[in-house]
Image (cartoon, helix red, strand yellow):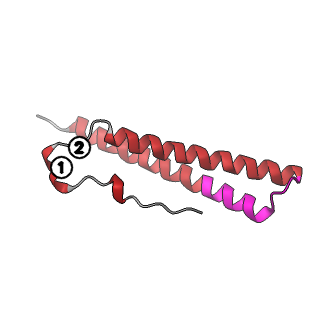
Amino acid sequence: MRITSIGNQIIPAKNAASGDAPAGFFSDILARAIENVKDAEEQDNLQTVGLVTGTGADLHSAMLAMEKADLALQFTVQIRNKILEAYNEVMRLQF
């Protein structure tokens, strides 16, 4: 399992406050996160097929890939829920 740093994805406070964030910054992060979920699911499928067909995948690797894909999907769903919740809150604001 590879752990990557999120340090390069954080906007400095002065840029965030002044609105100088790069265009598409949030959408790029979201697209990469969705791509990572897709990759985890593909790895899970490969490990599961390898286990079922007996072509090299062991039970331990297949279960780890399955749990990793499940956690990634659960995390993505929670992010979606938080985004929708924030959107609905903004829509409720009265000007």
Vertically, is 91 above or below 38? above
- Residue drawn 36% across and 43% down? 83
Residue projecting furthest to the front: 8
Q: Is residue 36 above or below residue 91?
A: below
Residue 32 part of the magenta-drawn span: no
Q: Look at label 2 and name its amino acid.
A: Ala
The majority secondary structure of the magenta stretch comes to: helix
| Residue 33 in the image, given as x and y percentages of width and height | 47, 47
Residue where numbered disc 2 is placed: 21
- The answer to whether the residue labelled 1 contacts the one labelled 2, judged by CB atoms less than 8 Å apart, is yes
Name the one closer to the observer, 89 or 76. Answer: 76
- At a point 22% along the width and 55% down the height, the residue shown is 12
User: Mark 2 or mark 1, which is nearer the start of the sequence?
Assistant: 1
Magenta residues (range):
54-69
Q: Quadrant of residue 25?
A: top left
- Residue 53: mark in rendering: none
- According to the image, label 1 marks what residue? 15
